[in-house]
Amino acid sequence: MTIQTLAVFCMVSVAIGGLAWVFIYPLMSGERQAEQRRASVARIEPVARVSRQQQRSRREQVEETLKELDIRARKSKSLPLQMKIDQAGLSWSKQKFIVVSCGLGLAVLVLAFVFGLGLLPGLAFAFAAGAGAPLWMLTYLRKRREKKFLESFPDAVDVVVRGIKAGLPLIDSLRIIAMESQEPLKGEFRSVIETQAIGMPLGDACIKLYERMPLPEVNFFSIVIAIQQKSGGNLAEALGNLSRVLRDRKKMRAKIQAMSMEAKASATIIGALPVIVAFLVFVTSPKYIELLWTEELGRMMLAGCAVWMSTGVFVMKKMINFDF
């Protein structure tokens, strides 16, 4: 079998695997049915019209507020680069981020030419370093910041509840959180106070908090504040219920993590096993395995193995990461 035949076989295998991933995996995994169910639940029903002479009921005001929040959430799905940088907790400007990314890609391209990797592999590594690595770092920093925010957010809601029950205004309770809490909770609530101080309503300022910290828990908090600002009601009771919901979600998240640790350990072992075996074979019999990177056919086999291993690791990650 010639090298051209092997190359054609590898390309056809990759194409078949990609088609199966695109068309067959969504049907078998149930993602399409889950997406349809979420869409049916989140669908906004038209609000019944009421005559101008009648005063709008509290229920209609709540429905209108939820509709406005849902529209804003849909518009915020495609975030600009500067918003992603702010969510990661960095004080960089967009121009500085682009310059650093381009510099990193250029440095990797120069290193690729120094080590003699060739033009196409050098461009691939430069693109991964200049475009993929910075965005991945932003995602990592954002998730780490969100996790730290969630650790103390239920306690902050409890501070607001106790302050309202003690007779403090809502803005003073939020000011206590901005002064006494740890970062990033402190900085985010300070931004809410500053936004409200320049004339924006408190409900809209809390919605801005959700834009900077896109978490379901923060969305719940902003909805409660926005509805209370428009419709009134017992804010202490609503936030008390919200605090219990946040703590229950935290317990559920910890339970899911504990239940999925066995599957994650198995996936880690399965993913690391080929690399460990290849390393042990290289240590014991280097002449036996060095054909994989000294011969053209061996390099093609390594590239195919890397593609299929990456696909398998991605599939296992999707299977063991549970959302609720």
Image (tube, grey):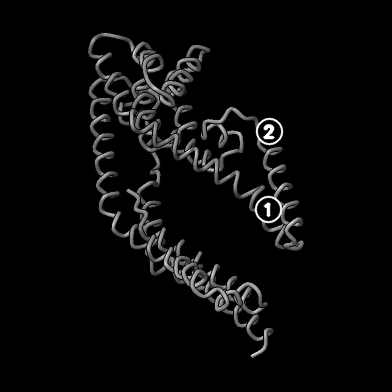
Q: Amino acid at mark 2?
A: Lys
In this view, which residue lies farthest toward the front?
A: 284
Q: Amino acid at mark 1?
A: Phe
How far from the left and from the top, in percent, is residue 120? Answer: 73, 63
Residue, x 55% and y 46% (percent of image)? 136
Residue, x 35% and y 26% (percent of image)? 227
Q: Is residue 63 left or right of residue 291?
A: left
Asked if one can make out residue 23 in the rendered structure from this viewpoint, the answer is no
Secondary structure type for disc 2: helix
How far from the left and from the top, in percent, is residue 251? Answer: 24, 40
Would you identify the image quadrant in which residue 174 lies?
top left
Number of marks drawn: 2
Residue closer to the observer: 169 or 261? 261
Q: Is residue 102 left or right of residue 223?
A: right
Residue closer to the observer: 251 or 116? 116
Instruction: Kindly report the distance in space between the C-alpha atoms of the residues bearing marks 2 and 1.
Output: 18 Å
Residue ID for mark 1 = 127
Residue, x 68% and y 58% (percent of image)? 124
Q: Earlier in the sequence, mark 2 or mark 1?
A: 2
In this view, which residue lies farthest toward the top?
A: 167
Residue closer to the observer: 11 or 279? 279
Q: Is residue 238 left or right of residue 146?
A: left
Residue ID for mark 2 = 96
Residue, x 39% and y 22% (percent of image)? 182
Query: In the figure, 269 relative to 218: above or below?
Result: below
How far from the left and from the top, in percent, is residue 98? Answer: 69, 39
- In what quadrant of the picture does the N terminus appear? bottom right
Is the Cβ of the residue at disc 2 closer than 8 Å to that at disc 1?
A: no
Query: In the figure, 129 relative to 87: above or below?
Result: below
Asked if one can make out residue 94 in the rendered structure from this viewpoint, the answer is yes
In this view, which residue lies farthest toward the bottom?
A: 1
Would you identify the image quadrant in which residue 207 lies?
top left
